[in-house]
Image (cartoon, rainbow, N blue to C red):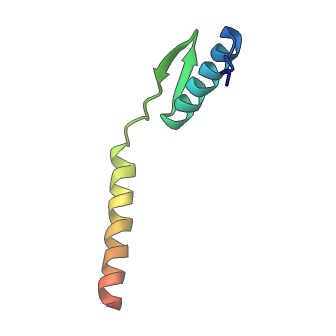
Amino acid sequence: MKRRRLSAAVRRRIGAAKKAWWARQKRTTITKGKLKIVKRKPMSPAARKRLSTLMKARWAERKKAA
């Protein structure tokens, strides 16, 4: 049985598609064939405090219900 081979162009196209897939998974961008990680901005102290009070209220509610 003879094996079929992929052309170089098809291999490049598959490789580019997979690279783009990984970029989406890792939240990165591709620039000129290179991956660049897009970092999230740090949370501001005000936002951190707001989330903290929301979580504490949620925990207190669950504790009260239990």
Identify the residue at image location x=42%, y=34%: 41
The answer to whether 11 appears left or right of 50 in the picture is right
The answer to whether 16 appears left or right of 51 in the picture is right
Identify the residue at image location x=37%, y=37%: 42
Residue 2 position by quadrant: top right
The answer to whether 13 appears left or right of 32 in the picture is right
Q: Position of residue 55 (x, y in %)?
A: 35, 67
Q: Position of residue 20 (x, y in %)?
A: 60, 26
Q: Is residue 16 above or below residue 23?
A: above
Q: Quadrant of the C terminus?
A: bottom left
Residue 54 position by quadrant: bottom left
Identify the residue at image location x=56%, y=34%: 24
Residue that extends furthest to the front in the rendered view of this protein: 1
Q: Position of residue 31 (x, y in %)?
A: 57, 13
Residue 19 position by quadrant: top right
So how many labels did they put on this image? Answer: 0
Q: Position of residue 15 (x, y in %)?
A: 59, 20
Q: Nearer the viewer, residue 4 or 60?
A: 4
Q: Is residue 22 above or below residue 63?
A: above
Q: Quadrant of the N terminus?
A: top right
Identify the residue at image location x=70%, y=16%: 10
Q: Nearer the viewer, residue 16 or 66?
A: 16
The answer to whether 34 appears left or right of 61 in the picture is right
